Amino acid sequence: MSEAAARSNGREVAIGRFPFTASGKAVALGETEGFVKVVADKPTGEILGVHIIGPEATEIIHEFAVGRTLEATLEEIVHTIHAHPTLSEAALEATLSALGHAIHI
């Protein structure tokens, strides 16, 4: 779900963004264009939508697909182990950003 759709449905949203320019792995690969954006329900932490543009987007999205299937909240995604250095750390960083706790931005 997009941010606009969530808001038009009356949801109070939390938005998290993480640019690949802030990812050490993306910088090392020379693939810094793009970002991960998370749209969540602020009161519950329910993940409503995720937008990924950039390197390995088709691989990174699976973390959120599994999260949605398991009805994981933002907090539960944050407490999942994320290997370092990886592009998928951008998923963690965007989720942390939605909670107001981003590390690298």
Image (cartoon, helix red, strand yellow):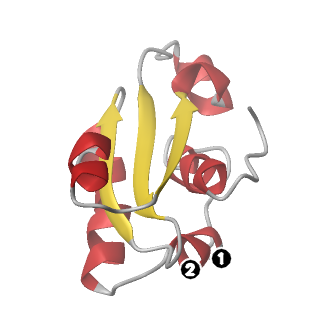
Residue at 63% x, 30% y is 23
**Visible residue check, residue 69:** yes
**Visible residue check, residue 1:** no
> Can you tell which quarter of the image residue 99 is in?
bottom right
Q: Is residue 76 above or below residue 16?
A: below
Residue 10 spot, x, y in % from top left: 30, 61
**51 or 48, nearer to the observer:** 48
Q: Is residue 12 above or below residue 38?
A: below
Q: Secondary structure at mark 2?
A: helix
**94 or 87, nearer to the observer:** 94
Q: Secondary structure at mark 1?
A: loop
The alpha-carbon separation of the residues under discs 2 and 1 comes to 5 Å
Direction from residue 92 to residue 103 in the image, left or right:
right
Crowding at mark 2 (Cα within 10 Å: few <14, some 14-19, many 20+): few
Residue at 56% x, 56% y is 95
Can you tell which mark lies on residue 69? none
Q: Label 2: which residue? A: 76
Residue 102 spot, x, y in % from top left: 73, 46
> Can you tell which quarter of the image residue 18 is in?
top right
Q: Amino acid at mark 1?
A: His
Q: Amino acid at mark 2?
A: Glu
Direction from residue 36 to residue 96 in the image, left or right:
right
Residue at 62% x, 69% y is 78
Q: Is residue 17 above or below residue 80?
A: above
Q: Label 1: which residue? A: 79
Q: Are marks 2 and 1 in contact (CB under 8 Å)?
A: yes
Crowding at mark 1 (Cα within 10 Å: few <14, some 14-19, many 20+): few
Residue 34 spot, x, y in % from top left: 41, 21
